[in-house]
Image: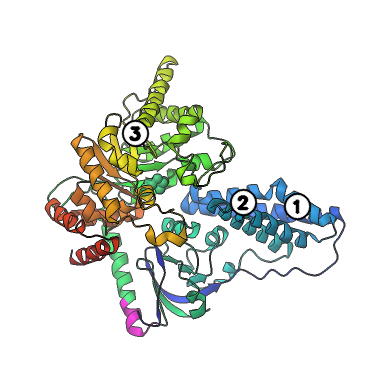
Amino acid sequence: MTENNFKGIPASDGIAVGRVFCYSPVELTIPVCAAGSVDEEMARFDTARERARVELQGLYEVIERRAGKKDASIFEAHQQMLSDPALEGKIREFVEIGQTVEQALVQATEELASLLSGMNDELFAARAQDVKDVGRRILRILLGLPDTALGAVVQPSIIVAEDLTPSDTASLDPKLTLGFITAQGGLTSHSAILARTLGLPAIVGMGDVLLDRVSNGTFIVMDGRTGEMIVEPDAETVAHYKQIKVQRDSHLQILKAAAEKDAFTANGRRVEVAANIGEVASARDAMEHGAEGIGLLRTEFLYLEDTQPPSEEKQYQIYCEIFEVMCGRPVIVRTLDIGGDKPPSYLPFPDEMNPFLGWRAIRISLDEPELFKTQLRAILRAAVGHQARIMFPMVSDLDELRRARDIVDAVKRDLAIASVGFAFDVPVGIMVETPAAAVLVDVLAEASDFFSLGTNDLTQYTMAVDRGNAKVSGLFQPLHPAVLRLIRHTIDAGHSKGKWVGMCGELAGMTKAIPILLGFGLDEFSMSARAIPEAKDLIGKLTDEKAREIASQAMSFGTAAEIENYMKGILASL
Ligand code: PEP
Ligand code: MG
């Protein structure tokens, strides 16, 4: 690494070469002037709030069109915050003691945000960010300033910022954004997720060095695949990266066209390559990228977008639409996986020291049978004439699985008694995402028709590392030998019981893992749609024998770094 080369966390694949636009949020200076009457100040607040609502609705619509409902839902949450009585009450309190609405707003949002971030919980800390984001928006409107400084980007640029809020990321114009790099943020930050959905190169967590070394107009190269940034590269480096970019773009186009065909290993073994999706828009994207099915339909967006749980009818309509888009291909519908970092407002969530170890996923479904039954009814009804499967998240015990299956049977009985049409023979399986489930696969096989490895949580629980905590992100190693042993055991034990074993965790779409997983005999790889063409190509280059050799060599190493290093060499040789 030379003094002009820097490395951050690679957050979204792709290369960009261009000039930097340094984004720093507009300085909002509160004018010193006398406050009007309480009614006058509160009326100004109301007008600004309405304007903010219109802006947020606009952002919601833009992101919904570009990336789907799930990514857009943050702006719905911001709209709800505008009507938060706690915020309005606090502002009124300050106005009543003689402050202008601008001063009152700043003080009120600061108090609310510090209350939330003082709770020492990642989720509340994120809410604190949202409160600040909403407060800034109203203040900017009160000051009569334009929507965002990102509006000043007039030529294609690489956006560099301390951090990007969801509102910032949403205002990026894809035609003018070559990619972005942030000093803060981790792989699971909103901006990183959105970048992957939109296909924008992104690097996050570069650290303070970023803003020390680049400013407006600095010429840089960024590689979202490796996390590298090169400042003021020489002509040779630029030519090199431009060439890689052109080759890569055309290679991806070729792979995308080839991905229409089903995946086979070089010796002709059929391997399913499917997509992970969260809603109808991404089902269409999955089809365009060659998905042979849906290995994971995350249904939680339905439970998080509103202040009440979704009705059976609403769910039925959405599932039907997704099944239809997938034209008879298999779709695995995961039942609600809420709790952890995704608690909806309408359930009585306890104060939890460790929400990821707490009231989450299947545990909630078993404790809230009516909520669970509503979802199961919708899935079973929508599944008529389609290849649907039901999958339970976060199972760690046979009794838990038996109870969940009993509820499925009870729902079927109720539907039959009520003469409502439903699919009787929908396979029911589980995610293997707790070490307990991985170790117990042979036992769980009694009540599970199939297994799908959830390596995001399996890594989190095996390595005892919070998957959303940037401070320990270096320990989140899905290619760690401990995780790989559990994966291999799950596949072997599942197969010995005659069960199909897939994988829907992020690892399934990582080229550095695919040869190993193929060597373990994994039946299905489910990943983000954009990763499919490359995955299919890689699978087609490997025989099972070669993959087994690679897997066995990889398993001889003692650390994730050694395995990654070995796999780098393998990928370069293919
Ligand atoms: C997983 O844990 O690997 C998984 C696919 O589920 P989620 O990321 O939704 O928890
Ligand atoms: Mg999971």
Disc 2 to disc 1, how far (Cα)?
Answer: 18 Å
Badge 2: how crowded within 10 Å, few (<14), some, or many (20+)? many
Please, what is the three-letter code of the amino acid marked with disc 2?
Answer: His
Q: Secondary structure at mark 1?
A: helix
Q: Is residue 289 above or below residue 396?
A: below
Circles 2 and 1, Cβ within 8 Å, touching? The answer is no
384 on left or right of 149:
left
Please, what is the three-letter code of the amino acid marked with disc 3?
Answer: Ala
Q: Quadrant of residue 568?
A: bottom left
User: Could you tell me residue 27's position as x and y percent?
Assistant: 66, 71
Mark 2 against mark 1, which lies toward the viewer?
1
Q: Tell which circle, 2 or 1, labels the residue nearer the N-terminal end.
A: 2
Residue 283 appearing in the image: no
Residue 443 appearing in the image: yes
Disc 2 to disc 3, how far (Cα)?
Answer: 35 Å
Please, what is the three-letter code of the amino acid marked with disc 1?
Answer: Lys
Work out whether residue 325 or residue 144 is closer to the camera in this orientation and state it: 144
Q: Which residue is mark 1?
A: 90
- Whether label 2 lies within 8 Å of ligand 1 gets the answer no
Q: Which residues are magenta?
A: 233-240
Residue 238 within the segment the image draws in magenta? yes
Q: Which residue is mark 3?
A: 388
User: Could you tell me residue 467's position as x and y percent?
Assistant: 43, 53
Q: Which residue is mark 2?
A: 78
Q: Give the quarter of the figure containing the N terminus.
A: bottom left
